[in-house]
Image (cartoon, coloured by chain):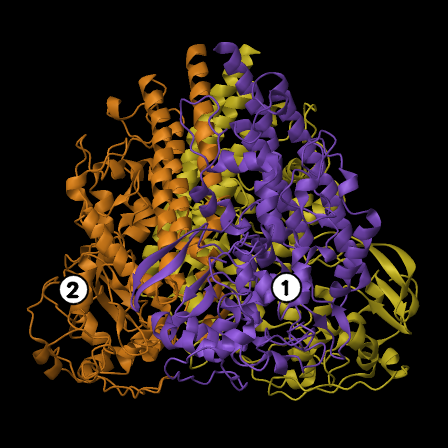
Chain colours: A purple, B yellow, C orange
Amino acid sequence: MISFTSFSWFGRFAGLVMIGAVVFAGSANCLQAAQISDDTKKCLSCHNKLTPGIVADWKKSRHSEISPSEAMQKSENEKRISATEFPGFSDKAVGCAECHMMNPDKHKDTFKHYGNQVHIIVTPNDCNECHPVEEKQFSKNLMANAHANLQDNAVYRTMVNSVNSFQPFDDKNPTYREADDLTNADSCLACHGTKVEVRDLKARKTAMGETKFPVLSGWPNQGVGRINPDGSRGACTACHTRHHFSIEVARKPYTCAQCHKGPDVPAYPVYMVSKHGNIFASINKQRNFDAVPWVVGRDFTAPTCAACHISLVTNKNGAIVAERSHQMNDRLPWRIFGLIYAHPHPKSPDTTVIRNKAGLPLPTDLTGELAEAFLITAEEQKARLEKMQELCTSCHSRQWVDGHFTKLDHTIENTNAITLEATKILFSAWEKGLAKGIAQGENIFDEAIEKKWTEQWLFYGNSTRFASAMGGADYGVFANGRWHQSKNLQEMKDYLKFLKTTQLEN
Amino acid sequence: MISFTSFSWFGRFAGLVMIGAVVFAGSANCLQAAQISDDTKKCLSCHNKLTPGIVADWKKSRHSEISPSEAMQKSENEKRISATEFPGFSDKAVGCAECHMMNPDKHKDTFKHYGNQVHIIVTPNDCNECHPVEEKQFSKNLMANAHANLQDNAVYRTMVNSVNSFQPFDDKNPTYREADDLTNADSCLACHGTKVEVRDLKARKTAMGETKFPVLSGWPNQGVGRINPDGSRGACTACHTRHHFSIEVARKPYTCAQCHKGPDVPAYPVYMVSKHGNIFASINKQRNFDAVPWVVGRDFTAPTCAACHISLVTNKNGAIVAERSHQMNDRLPWRIFGLIYAHPHPKSPDTTVIRNKAGLPLPTDLTGELAEAFLITAEEQKARLEKMQELCTSCHSRQWVDGHFTKLDHTIENTNAITLEATKILFSAWEKGLAKGIAQGENIFDEAIEKKWTEQWLFYGNSTRFASAMGGADYGVFANGRWHQSKNLQEMKDYLKFLKTTQLEN
Amino acid sequence: MISFTSFSWFGRFAGLVMIGAVVFAGSANCLQAAQISDDTKKCLSCHNKLTPGIVADWKKSRHSEISPSEAMQKSENEKRISATEFPGFSDKAVGCAECHMMNPDKHKDTFKHYGNQVHIIVTPNDCNECHPVEEKQFSKNLMANAHANLQDNAVYRTMVNSVNSFQPFDDKNPTYREADDLTNADSCLACHGTKVEVRDLKARKTAMGETKFPVLSGWPNQGVGRINPDGSRGACTACHTRHHFSIEVARKPYTCAQCHKGPDVPAYPVYMVSKHGNIFASINKQRNFDAVPWVVGRDFTAPTCAACHISLVTNKNGAIVAERSHQMNDRLPWRIFGLIYAHPHPKSPDTTVIRNKAGLPLPTDLTGELAEAFLITAEEQKARLEKMQELCTSCHSRQWVDGHFTKLDHTIENTNAITLEATKILFSAWEKGLAKGIAQGENIFDEAIEKKWTEQWLFYGNSTRFASAMGGADYGVFANGRWHQSKNLQEMKDYLKFLKTTQLEN
């Protein structure tokens, strides 16, 4: 909130002067357009011309077509709204004003804009007005903490720095410095989310005359763990793309691919070589990505990411196969990527609280021993697995499903064991003074042999596990998996020898 | 076959009690649903609820819509069935029972399931009942032998082991051990096919009460060269996806991409940067992927994988441009991937019979000399090329086509020559004792320099040839081709020096 | 032109005998088919059977549906033709003859074909008859000079040679030789364009009897900078795919991906992980890719490559958001790829005229200093940026847009600085005699450490910048960006040590 006295939603609605008539074109869907509030009409009166793209997207959205009160009359499984009390604007379309003028007091980015108290960034806390269940679930999602879990973790912050900071040739500890904010925002934090802060309130010439706007740092950003000017965490728009908020887009794997395509988290490329991905790619136009609930056998068969991890899935009789989840890992027993060893999921989405035996904020020791107190139990793992398997058994036999997960468990064990061998090589390098790591209080990600070690698990171990978990074997062998695990390990052994020879010689 | 007395198809059909009524919803296609057998009705009575996804897929399939006897009345080019004699169920839809109860005596995975003799895995030998021509063609396909050609080839088995086995840091011959079955199944054999064997018959609680099921090893698996419990080789479902068996899916490149996307066999990524792939990706929704025969100019212009390698293609007058082929390599003169050097296709799909001069089961010596007795002749190569070119000339002039294949021939020669240089470096390493290979009776794929040599041909040589063969040049330069060929060769030279220096020093 | 006396379009049209009747099937579009010239009817009379695929494509094309004179009656924004004078065939469809018989005197590949003067390769100079504005714009495009800028640049030609030439193990300067024409054509020149020359006129048996055809070198090729037999530069068909010439295909990113997918120019993979790419991939079927003008908010919202770089974009009122541009870089201030350092765009599309301080045909020194006289000014950069930003602001606020480009500018600066550090390592190698480069008058791309240096900018610096420019962060970190920048730099440092140790030892 930048300066104004706040007043209630109701009060604000009453005091407005409507500026100009807005012609509202009918949408392609069968739904009638809902009535537009005067505040939103006022927004549209300019933005229809100034930013026609986003207005067009909104006009295609369900938000423009149905009011919260209408939405709340749907049956339990059909509802896309989870509020139990009507919001103030319950009989109007969910337009510009309804979201960008929500909770003005909480928003440090609120500013006076042609008479209204508007904020730039709509946050999970705003969406919460109509979607409180989803917002709460998401707050338990590791992704809501993606910024903090990276930047406030002392070990991972050194990885960020070693990747993003400037590295002079003649600097002996080249990457052990703080990376600058703009580079971080353009790199890791593009997905993990920046911290968006209000720096100033500045006037700028616009097509409508000179106007003051808050000046934001860390903006633009749509990272899933963004820290917002109202203190909330996350960006719903990472997946529910502005201003169409199309559930079809969110359910298609291209949305996840925005952040899950690289070798560190190769969910998308693995999916695309799986049988599921093949069917999706070949005939998704014959499927229905808009239906709520999402009925297996009617709307789709082969799942997308959303079908297994997020969406409310029912069968044709309306029986629930999987509850909607914005926590996501409540169906996942193992965390198979991002860390040195695959491990049971952490209990808290805030992973900065974890301490391993060595006192580091990591879920395992460097040797793989679990920081058990911070991780879910074997019972909880079993319960989560069973939730996931409910989905599998809509199409697959019990033996099929069990066989699949037996292979995955074996692969987790096997890749962890290989990572341990790579870690022993790194330990040897540190012991022999061929690299500087933990013992020397140094960054463990900055030297070449440390980067080779990092790729061993961050790329190859992870990828092998993803390929196993999602049935995309082609990715897990030569594309980015077992071949590279095996090759990298042999190269690390030779690299150790080369470093030793070079040390002796110089 | 687990235990029961077998009896004929006819007998089984007669003796059944129909359990419950099955409501069968009409499909989206114009075809009338065919009559469903009593046995299949019985299956559906439970599985409609238990596994609604696969039932929904089957209901969309042609198998549910047309009986074999109707299918056999189509004109020669329109037929999708190649049987000349009616199968026992010829007037019924091809449902659950028709396939999963076929040939019960031959199947070691047959078990008694609610009164019926059912087997889990439908095999090429079962599909053969209606599709004998395709089954026979496929048996001549290298892919039908993909399991055996890998696992029963002494040289390639050491590659599998070096990729999939566990590799301790302190083991001097780290990868020279047998990889375990679960890892192999999750890795190479996911595409090459596992050997599926019946281990036991065990009771399990199900939603319908306690039931006994065969316990299978190597399952689930849909690898193209799977060894089945009835002794047959292959899995039609690798491409003809259960239980929709959509020809549209099989004809789209995403199906091939399941196993042909990695750097070792990059058919899909090469296709996608080719002009053909561009046209497919941009406007495939304007094309017809369901038509049989597939008419060039009417149903499609730019080909997919299937158009060039498999499908029956005719022109608008019904003249055949290419016969349907499930052998596939009957249009391919050269085998351009997977082996050290590109070479004429082997005569037999069972490549374990091949012996090069050194007595190894490889189609060339390590120096590239051909094991000619086991490979097709130049005349046969010419005949195969001409078959392929028939397809090209539907859109391209003779000069265009000749120019294209002249480049490919040159690229084959050129990449083979570069591989030979890399092999000389490896020979030098073996001679100098910097690595242990053939002469020492050791695995030739396990040490770092051997893995670099392997990538020289398995990744870069192969990829360069694929890019040339399919007109996807972008993939063949910087993505995964000539740049890497050239870089890897220079790095191998330096690596040899580093190894030598290290050896001298230690 | 091979031999014949040329005569005017009009004359040729008059003297023809029509051979056979051609049945012309109606197209899927609403347009009426335009009248077909007698010459084209003659072509079709054979080619309808001989090459049915391309005839089918043409029949679907706008060229078959509308005559130039009809096209010229459209409103200014709707016109796809830019000629101001009617071409000779103005009332006929633009068929085979209209293009392949255009400008016969200029074409060295013109030959007598069943009584007509036909040439094989239709060039920008032919397309110019109806599309002169586009042809002129394209002549200012760097791509029109893609062949010459590579092959006639002394430095870059050594890169081509080091990638494409044969490299014996025992040759001390292995890659410093001229690569052969067929390999170049199959590699770099597939995209950059070959030089197509007429070698001979030779008879060949065809389905229609023996016929003489020109024999072409460098053919087939559809590279964007192809040197044509009429002396013109470029191939419109690189993007406007024969013979459909579908604007939908040209506007979809798969067209650009043909040459812009590899790690050197990763526009496509970056786009596909951007929010724009996600929206395109998820719901492009709901968008209109055929409309001219292309109306933001009506036909599309999230842009494809074409929307930002090429197409005429208007808003719903017909006001122009961006002019059509076939120059493309008139909206681009920076050239962010292909060269060692990102730099302001060159003034001339012919970059062979550039000389840096050291006299090399490069836009910067090896240390990054700009060859300013040959590059656009800061003012021009600003003007180009503003043109681009006009497009952005159709959907994004000014602050969003400014924030985006601030990050890009920082990333350009940052990646250039990192490249400089890598270059210092290379200088050190040259100074110490561990590699041979500029000072020794040697190829700077052929030794392993030089190739590592090349990847530093050609792959990792470029990719990081693309990811920043197009909002595809996932590609710019672990897929092919900052992680690799950082890792490669550390590896170069170690590599330098290994080379030195090896030199001392041997």
Q: Where is C199 relative to B176, above or below?
A: below
**Chain of the residue on which disc 2 is drawn:** C
Determine whether, in the image, residue C178 is placed left or right of residue A223: left
Residue drawn at x 70%, y 24% is: B171
Q: Amino acid at mark 1?
A: Ala
Numbered disc 1: secondary structure? helix
Q: Position of residue A419 (x, y in %)?
A: 67, 34
Determine which quarter of the picture holds residue A411: top right
Q: Where is B303 relative to A288, above or below?
A: above
| Marks 2 and 1 on same chain | no
Q: Which residue is mark 2?
A: C125
Of the numbered discs in the image, which one, if any, rests on residue B344? none
**Other residues around mark 1 within 10 Å, as few (<14) / some (14–19) / many (≥20):** some
Of the numbered discs in the image, which one, if any, rests on residue A306? 1
Q: Position of residue B84 (x, y in %)?
A: 66, 78
Q: Which numbered mark, 2 or 1, is in the foreground of this view?
A: 1
